[in-house]
């Protein structure tokens, strides 16, 4: 829906052609929808406000990020337990709002979980604390293990994926992904929208992340060829993981919706 760096909000922000019309049609028809970005550099409400400023009808409650998923997951599985999290306010605020206890670096050994988000100031002290927590038995969670993401300026490296890969190399722990393509994302989306996962239609530009996530969960997958994946990527994808529908740009969905 938006072309920019999803972690920092940097870049020339613009709504993708046809995105506003698609959302307007869905709203008019009473079709519920939510938006999800793997970036955690910005608070969900801030992202929603930016989208509205670009003419996209997205309410705060309809904007989800891996921080939203992590907050729900940690509140349910480790209520009141200390969590060592790395990122910015875009990650910390949803966690704090859900009552997740954020541990300090000095409390690393007592942390019951480690959560890696987009942290542009990650350093050796943080790496040491994270590894000590994992060595002490804390599971390693990460917002995204994607190697890169598409932006208006071209492909950019994923901060959280790079950090988590380093911790995995040091500790041997396999990260639990709380962003795309984790099934946890669709579980939360279905809860927010009040439906079953199988009733979801997932629209995205990455055949491996969004479409793979959708098809693995039994949801409909709609691939838009204006971002990460191209037609040749679809052809190279196993039949069971291919999108249900492929469109050139987001605006082409209007014809199918009508």
Image (cartoon, rainbow, N blue to C red):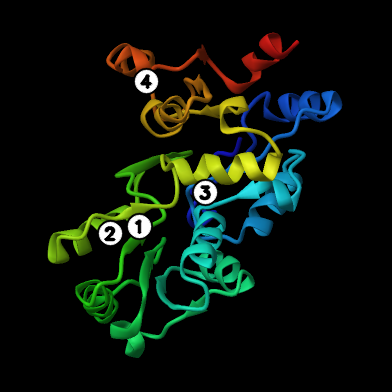
Contact, CB < 8 Å: mark 4 with mark 2? Answer: no
**Mark pair 1, 3: CA separation:** 19 Å
Q: Residue at x 45, y 17 (%)?
A: 243
Q: Residue at x 35, y 57 (%)?
A: 160
Vertical placement of residue 242 versus 187, above or below = above
Q: Earlier in the sequence, mark 1 or mark 3?
A: 3
Q: Using the image as rendered, state which of residue 84 and residue 12 is in the foreground.
A: 84
**Mark pair 2, 1: CA separation:** 6 Å
Contact, CB < 8 Å: mark 2 with mark 1? Answer: yes
Q: Position of residue 36 (x, y in %)?
A: 57, 43
Q: Earlier in the sequence, mark 3 or mark 4?
A: 3
Residue wearing tag 3: 11
Q: Position of residue 17 (x, y in %)?
A: 64, 25
Q: Earlier in the sequence, mark 4 or mark 2?
A: 2
Q: Position of residue 258 (x, y in %)?
A: 76, 10
Residue wearing tag 4: 241
What is the quadrant of residue 89 in the picture? bottom right
Residue wearing tag 2: 164
């Amino acid at each position: 829906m938006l072309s920019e760096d999803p972690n920092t909000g940097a870049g020339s922000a613009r709504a993708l052609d046809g995105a506003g019309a698609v959302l307007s049609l869905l709203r008019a028809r009473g079709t519920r929808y939510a938006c999800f970005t793997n970036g955690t550099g910005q608070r969900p409400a801030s992202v929603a406000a930016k989208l509205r400023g670009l003419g996209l009808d997205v309410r705060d409650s309809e904007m989800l990020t891996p921080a939203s998923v992590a907050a729900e997951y940690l509140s349910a599985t480790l209520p009141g337990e200390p969590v060592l999290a790395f990122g910015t306010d875009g990650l910390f605020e949803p966690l704090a709002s859900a009552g997740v206890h954020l541990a300090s670096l000095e409390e690393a050994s007592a942390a019951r979980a480690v959560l890696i988000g987009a942290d542009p100031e990650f350093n050796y002290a943080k790496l040491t604390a994270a590894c000590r927590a994992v060595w002490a038995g804390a599971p390693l969670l990460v917002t995204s293990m994607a190697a890169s993401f598409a932006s208006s300026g071209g492909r950019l490296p994923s901060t959280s994926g790079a950090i988590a890969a380093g911790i995995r190399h040091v500790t041997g722990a396999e990260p639990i992904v709380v962003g795309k393509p984790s099934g946890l994302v669709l579980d939360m989306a279905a809860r927010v929208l009040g439906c079953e996962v199988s009733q979801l239609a997932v629209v995205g530009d990455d055949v491996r992340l969004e479409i793979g996530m959708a098809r693995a969960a039994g949801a409909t997958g709609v691939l838009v060829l204006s971002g990460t994946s191209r037609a040749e990527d679809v052809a190279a994808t196993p039949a069971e993981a291919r999108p249900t529908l492929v469109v050139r740009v987001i605006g082409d969905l209007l014809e199918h919706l009508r």
